[in-house]
Amino acid sequence: MNYFVEGLQGSGKSSLARMIAEKKPEYVLKQEGDYSPVELAWCAYLNEDQYQKILKKYPEMRKEIEEKTYAEGEKKIVCYTKIRTDNHGFYQDLEQYEIYNNRVSWEEFQDIVLSRYRNWNQDGMIFECSLFQNTVEDMILFRNALDDEIVAFYRKVREALEGKEYRIVLLKAEDVRGNLAVIRKERSDEQGNELWFPMMMQYFNECPHAKARGLEGEEALIRHFIHRQELELKLCEEVFPDKYIVLTSKKYTEKDIQNIINEY
């Protein structure tokens, strides 16, 4: 059995994934930025030439880069956000080699995502936001995909996952606005300066989806999150009807988690 823990930013995915991992110590937990067999969030996806150019540009970091690099056929996957450096240019350079935010063609994106789900053959895994969040955000915000197009794509995902044992644990936020307020406070420095929210706002305001519709600001972001949550619930109901469990964000209990563990 495997678990995909999903939900909006601030819904508590990291905490829930860790709680399941504590109850299933024999399982492997994969969070954003980790090297994962199914997802590439916060990782650079390079060919050999691109990889060698990065090593040449940052010779003083070669050891750290190599330690966080994984080979998959002709590709190199660099978990660059796991590397600590004061050189912010390094992160900007590696970010350009991510597959999300319309950085690769739609055809290539589909091929990469579906082939990783198809080729994954491990068991006993817990994945944090490795099924919906980054792919759905890419399709809505950067490819202007309609809901029906996203549902159609996830039917292909379901086919790619055929034969694998997994459950989707979806955290549903009852108060999206309130959750956003909590995460803004949690992701601030000791002086109360917000670190995450300004970047999130810039990310949203500058995406093709927002620009094409004249959207901007916190209210537009909240409407987007509400829509995304509704869409992810729809994906569960229409594409994965036998594979999902919904928990209420911030309100689930130890017993709820134990029931999931016991049942699956």
Image (spheres, rainbow, N blue to C red):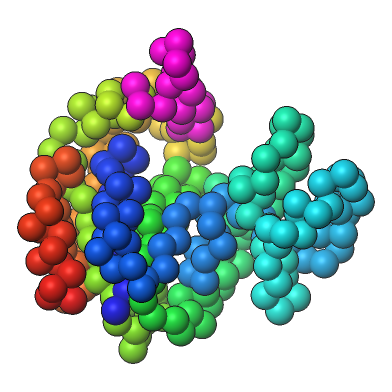
Q: Residue at x 38, y 56 (%)?
A: 128
> How far across and down, in percent of the image, does residue 104 sit?
63, 57
- Using the image as rendered, state which of residue 40 and residue 188 is in the foreground: 188
**Residue 203 appears in view:** yes
| Relative to 241, 63 lies left or right | right
What stretch of residues is rendered in magenta? Answer: 185-204
| Relative to 221, 46 lies left or right | right
37 vs 133: above or below: below
| Relative to 89, 173 lies left or right | left
Q: Give the quadrant of residue 180.
A: top left
Q: Give the quadrant of residue 47.
A: bottom right
Q: Give the quadrant of residue 240.
A: bottom left
Number of marks in the rendered image: 0
> How far across and down, in percent of the image, does residue 237 sit?
16, 65
**Residue 235 appears in view:** no
Q: Residue at x 13, y 63 (%)?
A: 258
